[in-house]
Amino acid sequence: MTRKSLCRVVCSCILMLPLDALTAAEAGNLRAGAAKVDITPSADAALQMSGYANRTAGFKSIHDDLNVRAIVLDDGAAQAAIISCEIIGLSHAFWEKMTDRIARETGIARENVLLASVHTHAAPSTGVYERELSPNQAAYVTKLENAILESVRQAKSTLQPARIGFGTGNAKVNVNRRAPNGEGGWMLGNNPDGVSDKTVAVIKFETPSGEPFAIFSNYGVHGTVLGPGNLQVSSDLPGATSRYVERHFGGKVISVWTSGTAGDQDPIYRVGTDFQNVTALGAILGEEVVRVAGTIKTNGRAHVRGMQRLVTCPGKRTVQSSGSGREYRFEDADPVPIRLSLLVINDIAIAGVSGEVLTNIGLRLKRESPFNRTIMITHCNGSSGYLPDDAAYDQVSYEITATRAKRGCAEDAIVNGLVAMMGAMF
């Protein structure tokens, strides 16, 4: 038996033990708090929308509010924060600056912070894909920074005795978008035969008397029900899901939604301007979150620990020929940094990756993880662009031409890196 195999056997045996036996020496009584802070731009703000390269106009109106939602955890020895922003993304530089502020002003260590975006394509630009910010964009990013910090402060100020539990469900609102074009190539489209993870992961936080006050959910889908023709600010499908859950509980619950491995997953209805589709898909996904939450059994003991690691992959850029064949070639470019984050709560492993990870990488992590309860949050703690699995490079589609990472690195760097981090948690 190899050392790696032995480690997996030992870890599997440990995970079969009840929580009291697993963390008797370290676990404390859980306290948790949650908060929501508005980040909607003013109606007259001259801000460019993000998400579609051919959409250069600013937004015309606001359809629904944008928010930052946060959950803060405390096990008596360590504190952690899970933060979800209804924007398209956050740069590595933004993460560095923001987590410095969080650590300095709230005392929560940087390695215990998961700062994610939901990747809605109907929000203002935050400078993730632009080299320089306009003055109006810079002002909005400052508003975003202050709101993130305020969400953590408010969540921490509401820390209370809590119970935590985990469950999973299934929702069919995503579809693989890497589709054959009928000419031997690949394009953006709907591919029902392509790989897709329908898992809805849910973590419920409730009072000792059983009243839910925060629900974390994770699902792999792009926030692209609304297409480039839409010029109204919206949190798209992620926000519609959170609002559904919050309305179900009468506004007494903060619903923190995060994106799973959505790099190759679109909504089953997409690229339109019909907000009815947003509402409908949000209701389907939100109802499954509510259903799963209702089945979860909770525990008041907790052991919280976090870790982060930066890995680097060789970089490439894509050049398209000007001839009739319009063929692509790849050239060497700057290396691509990828931040791996891990927050473990009892036997729940929440893995963060700073990029748009394709589904096969997430599925492989679940198979190889020593934790039976493993979640991957993408667009988390920075932005590394598309991160395909090795096999995906055989099918040259948008994700492959857009990625800045050369083939043969991202998949192993992410999975092996996170599995090693998980092993170090025991």
Image (tube, rainbow, N blue to C red):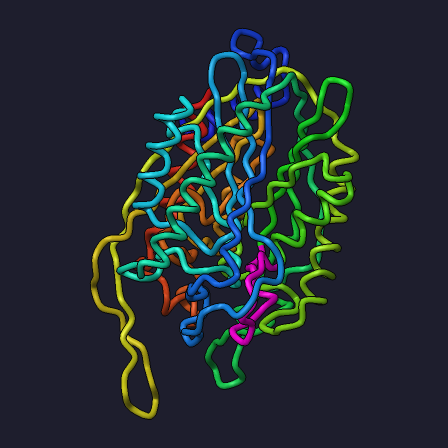
Q: Horizontal and vertical percent for residue 285?
A: 71, 52
In this orientation, which residue lies closer to the viewer: 222 or 2?
A: 222
Residue positioned 55% across, 41% down in the render:
37
Q: Quadrant of the N terminus?
A: top left
Determine whether 336 is above or below 158 in the image: below
Determine whether 273 is above or below 137 in the image: below
In the image, is residue 230 part of the stretch drawn in magenta? Answer: yes
In the image, is residue 50 part of the stretch drawn in magenta? Answer: no
Q: Is the magenta stretch mostly helix, strand or loop?
A: loop
* 172 left or right, relative to 131: right
In this orientation, which residue lies closer to the viewer: 396 or 273?
A: 273
Residue found at the very far top of the displayed protein: 25
In this orientation, which residue lies closer to the viewer: 411 or 69?
A: 69
* 274 left or right, relative to 87: right
Residue positioned 49% across, 76% down in the render:
187
Q: Horizontal and vertical percent for residue 299?
A: 69, 19
Q: Horizontal and vertical percent for residue 271?
A: 58, 72
Residue positioned 58% across, 39% down in the render:
36
In magenta, the rendered stretch is: 221-236
In this orientation, which residue lies closer to the viewer: 126 or 115?
A: 126
* 375 left or right, relative to 308: right
Determine whether 223 is above or below 208 in the image: below
Residue found at the very far front of the displayed protein: 44
